[in-house]
Image (tube, rainbow, N blue to C red):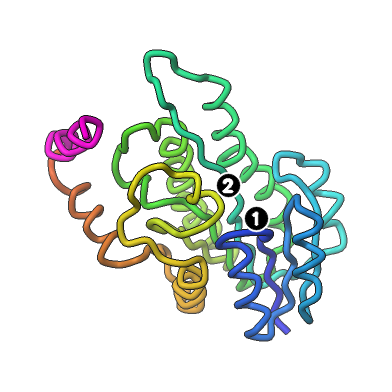
Amino acid sequence: MKTVLITGATSGIGKALCSLYQQLGWQVFACGRNQDSLNELQQLSGVTGLNFDICDKQKIQESTADLSELDLVILNAGSCEYIDDPMKFDSALFERVVRTNLIAVGYCLEVLIPKIKVGGQLALMSSSASYLPFPRAEAYGASKAAVSYLAKSLSVDLAPHNISVSLINPGFVKTPLTDKNNFAMAMLISAEQAATYIEKGLSRRKHEIHFPPLFTYLLKFFAWLPDTIWRYFAIRMLQK
């Protein structure tokens, strides 16, 4: 039986991934802070809940101490908050988002990389927002752009250890996190659809998994163009 550890497993994409891998016959280690949700997941055969906050390195170490020889680690947990007024830049908000989306990933990597078996896989959750600078996304976008660089660098350094690294760049996915957005989300897909894209990409050991394709390729196209073109459209977004 193959083993997968998934952070942020109590809701959204993480929860959908837990259900999908459980259905595929994997042993799933579902990680999260919400014990009630973990209890619900543990009703599924082959799912073990691990309760910890990814921002607490000691708790990560304690909760995963008995684990070894993992086939796949998916670092999915994250948060999103927006800078609504750049003239009153909220450094506390910025620190919270960067700590959760980037620094905590480092904690997880320190603890979990040694537990990945030879020939195993590591996946990091970034965002298609990392392709382009979006309004209000100074904290979220910066943190995810850093995760993207981190994943690409790790894919080089872990190759000699026979551990493959995948970077996941979703578009808009309907989750409790995106339910808080007060703007129209183009080409929104379900968490279950996202989980299917991710599982298929990981099964092929793709270095980058991005979806839905029409949306992400459109962003990639704009990222390829001169910066001034996207900046014009981004400023227009603010004026609507």
Q: Secondary structure at mark 2?
A: loop
Q: Main secondary structure of the magenta part?
A: helix
Instruction: Find residue 81 and report its horizontal and vertical position in percent.
Output: 50, 35
Is 141 on the left-hand or right-hand side of 154?
left
Name the residue rendered at 61%, 34% in the picture: 99
**Disc number placed over residue 199 in the picture, else none:** none
The part of the chain drawn in magenta is 227-240
For the residue carrying disc 1, how many other residues have a C-alpha within 10 Å: few (<14), some (14-19), or many (20+)? many
Name the residue rendered at 46%, 67% in the picture: 190
**Quarter of the image where one finds residue 27:** bottom right
At label 1, which amino acid type do we have? Gly
Q: Which residue is mark 2?
A: 78
Between residues 51 and 118, which one lies in front from this camera angle?
Answer: 51
Instruction: Find residue 111 and report its horizontal and vertical position in percent.
Output: 74, 50
User: Earlier along the polypeptide chain: callout 2 or callout 1?
Assistant: 1
Instruction: Find residue 69 and report its horizontal and vertical position in percent.
Output: 75, 70
Is 143 on the left-hand or right-hand side of 132?
right
Q: CA distance from mark 2 to mark 1?
A: 7 Å
Q: Is residue 24 magenta?
A: no
For the residue carrying disc 2, how many other residues have a C-alpha within 10 Å: few (<14), some (14-19), or many (20+)? many
Q: Is residue 162 above or below residue 135?
A: below
